[in-house]
Amino acid sequence: MYKPSLAVIYLGDQSGLPQASLDFRTNGRYRNICPFAEIVSTPKFRFKLECGIHEVKPLACRISPLGRFKNLKSGENFYFIHKPAEDCCCINSNKRIRILDYIRDNALGEYFENRDKASELYPLLFNTPSEFKYIAGFMMFNFDVMYLSQRLNPNLARPKSFDILVREIRKLILEYKQFYLRTNGKIE
Ligand code: SF4
């Protein structure tokens, strides 16, 4: 799906590496809600928020309330729990579930694999200035600009294979790194 300006891209406080977050905004009676949230009316609730992209929602939403942190150097995974929102229907649940079962039942394996492939782009940014990292972040998270700059429709031009997409972004970052080196001298 291509929709401009639905994410904010920034450098993480601790990692200094590019991150992207959904750009929460005001929508009617709601403040700070996801741009993909849809306001619906049900027999039980006059107004209720639902995810408008449930089938393709981002990994962070898909695994909630679980969170995952991966150590890029050791490859180790660490899991943690986000505090559920006050109105979360699971907040009073006493159900216990093993993390491995949660990952299997929610078919998260492929999403983790793709996230890890995208994380392999990060070493390209190690020991580079913040300015370079920030622009590379746009290449990583706002990659449709690659197609728009060639006057292509991103929905048609974007590869269906995630592997190929990551390869295209890698190539673009490397080309930009060469350009940056030529115009700014040494990068490290
Ligand atoms: S679950 Fe859907 S509506 Fe909620 S934050 Fe994620 S993308 Fe947005």
Image (spheres, grey):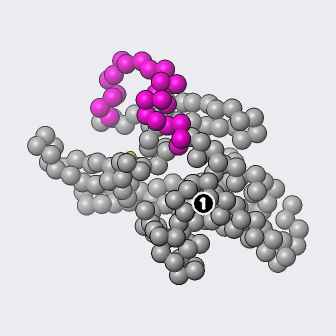
User: Where is residue 68, by image quadrant?
Assistant: top right
Identity, as a three-letter code, of the amino acid under mark 1: Leu
Residue at (43%, 67%) from the top-left corner?
Answer: 3
Residue at (71%, 52%) from the top-left corner?
Answer: 122
Q: Is residue 104 magenta?
A: yes
- Relative image position of residue 136 (x, y in whole percent): 68, 64
Q: Is residue 16 left or right of residue 142?
A: right
User: Where is residue 10, by image quadrant?
Assistant: bottom right
Q: Is residue 40 left or right of residue 15?
A: left
- Relative image position of residue 81 (x, y in whole percent): 49, 30
Q: Check the picture and name the quadrant holding the N terminus.
A: bottom left
Return the residue nearer the eye: 116 or 167.
167
- Relative image position of residue 54 (x, y in whole percent): 35, 48
Name the residue beneath numbered marker 1: 165
- Location of residue 37 with respect to 44 vertically, above or below: below
User: Where is residue 176, by image quadrant?
Assistant: bottom right
Return the residue nearer the eye: 12 or 5.
5
Q: Is residue 16 visible?
A: no
**Extent of the magenta region:** 88-111
- Location of residue 60 with respect to 66 vertically, above or below: below
Q: Is residue 162 visible?
A: yes
Q: Check the picture and name the quadrant holding the C terminus.
A: bottom right
Q: Please, what secondary structure does the residue beneath circle 1 have?
A: helix
Residue at (16%, 50%) from the top-left corner?
Answer: 41
Return the residue nearer the eye: 148 or 122.
148
Residue at (37%, 37%) from the top-left corner?
Answer: 85
- Relative image position of residue 170 (x, y in whole percent): 70, 61
Disc 1 within 8 angstroms of ligand 1 (CB): no
